[in-house]
Amino acid sequence: MLSVFCYTEFAVEIPVAGGSFAYLRVELGDVAAFIAAANLILESIIGTAAVARSWTSYLASLINKPASALRIHTSLAEGYNELDPIAVVVIAVTATLAILSAKGTSRVNWIASAVHVVVIAFVIVAGFLHAKTSNLTPFMPYGVPGVFRAAAIVYFAYGGFDNIATMAEETKNPSRDIPLGLLGSMSVITVIYCLMALVLSMMQPYTAIDRNAAYSVAFSNVGMRWAQYVVALGALKGMTTVLLVGALGQARYTTHIARSHIIPPVFALVHPRTGTPVHATVLIAAAGACIGLFSSLDVLSSLLSVSTLFIFMMMATALLVRRYYVRGVTSRTHATRLVVLLAVVIGSSAGIAAYWGLAPERWVGYTVLVPAWAAGTLGIQLLVPAARAPKVWGVPLVPWLPSLSIATNLFLMGSLGAQAFIRFGVCTAVMLLYYVLVGLHATYDVAHGACSDDADEEVYADPADVDDGKQAAAAGAATTDVERAGAKI
């Protein structure tokens, strides 16, 4: 919810497509924006692969097979040894639907979502009828570290709200609709998620929970075999909806990133007949299919959570920069103080996360690190005058809530295993190598007008507004303003 607050202020104050990429580019510059862009694309690819792998597991449950029965078992390394061609087909089909028609995809999404809500209600009600409080003992079998590690791993399940922020450009009344959409949807989703988790934990012992098709197997174990099929079918519909919505939202991110030429601008082109970003959709789908073919859910979920948490931490940092630094307004002294105090906040938060990850049972280090975080946050409040106030809607209790968001996201990152950070480090190294060799030069050319105006006009066409010339012109102008601001910074 802390991250949602930060996104909401940006979406209301800068209502353009591009989400966190656009916001970070304006406030922190091109390097931070590229890191966000790379992680957004990585998040899109991994998320697509993870959902498609789950789709296969529930399909196997629907036909009374073990979760991995429909995969091809090989002698590859653990975590990569079950090939999933069905996941590849599912990704290809949903991407094709998203390419053919955005409006058609929206209609399918509405129908599938309605069915999925009914299935969720059924799972909660029927599940509680077969719930046993004895299954909640022991309540925390893996202790407090297990709780936070699990929270960090499932964090990506809440990450879809940033797709709402990308729709700010087309929202009629963003100052009202965006806060309601983001804060309202996240509140409802959190309640539903907790109820679903409680039902699952009470239906059977935690040791009996199936990691791939949890709910359909749980109903089978309590004697409701017929419900197994209802739940599996509902899960398949729900995951199909996620893939369809993801194909639309992720393509929107990718086209906006391509507009800046950080990645080749061909991925920003919109098909003149369908009005959809074909190249961007194919990029995410093809990469997601390749990873989904090989990688298990354990590998995908931990890497996806690291990427999501990292972006949300950057967003909270960008919000503090937005509130306390404006070029030409903030003095050099105050700017230096802000940088130092932000370094204290981020450094102490990272220290708390590292200390927790290495020695969660100890507490001595927190007596130094927690006061250091509080001192850094209080220093921003007292020693750096606010340079900008939100015009319409803003995060309350600044700088405390954004600072707490930084600490929380980094803390959850520290709860993940070492392998997740190794994979994240390798991906980040590849991303930065690409940026140094390609992206840096491309964005420099754009910032200095090396690209033609005609090319820019073609690239900056927004997929949602192809059929409406006036909206497209307004959206293009708003986006261009953000791009220019980012280039100046």
Image (cartoon, rainbow, N blue to C red):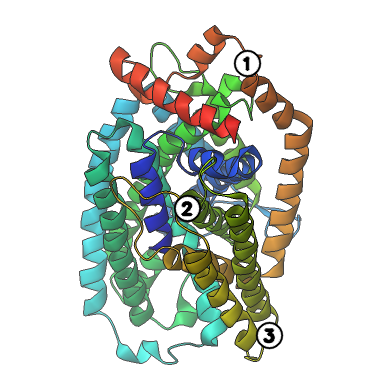
Residue 6 located left or right of residue 444 = left
Secondary structure type for disc 2? helix
- Would you say residue 239 is visible in this rendering? no
Q: Earlier in the sequence, mark 2 or mark 3?
A: 2
Above or below, 486 relative to 449:
below
Residue drawn where x is 68% and y is 20% of the image: 445
Q: Are marks 2 and 3 in contact (CB under 8 Å)?
A: no
Crowd band around label 2 with a 10 angstrom C-alpha radius: few (<14), some (14–19), many (20+): many
Above or below, 475 relative to 378:
above
Residue in the foreground of this view, choosing between 81 and 461: 461
Residue 265 located left or right of residue 398 = right
Which amino acid does the dot numbered 3 rest on?
A: Ala
Residue 80 located left or right of residue 25 = right
Residue in the foreground of this view, choosing between 379 and 72: 379
Horizontal and vertical percent for residue 178?
A: 29, 45
Q: CA distance from mark 3 to mark 1?
A: 52 Å
**Which residue in the structure is indicated by mark 3?**
359
Horizontal and vertical percent for residue 472?
A: 35, 18
Residue drawn where x is 75% and y is 58% of the image: 77
Residue drawn where x is 42% and y is 48% of the image: 388
- Would you say residue 54 is visible in this rendering? yes
Q: Which quadrant is the N terminus positioned in?
A: bottom left
Q: Which quadrant is the C terminus positioned in?
A: top right
Q: Which mark is residue 319?
A: 2
Q: Quadrant of residue 187?
A: bottom left
Which amino acid does the dot numbered 2 rest on?
A: Leu
Q: Quadrant of residue 424?
A: bottom right
Q: Quadrant of residue 201?
A: bottom left
**Which residue in the structure is indicated by mark 1?**
449
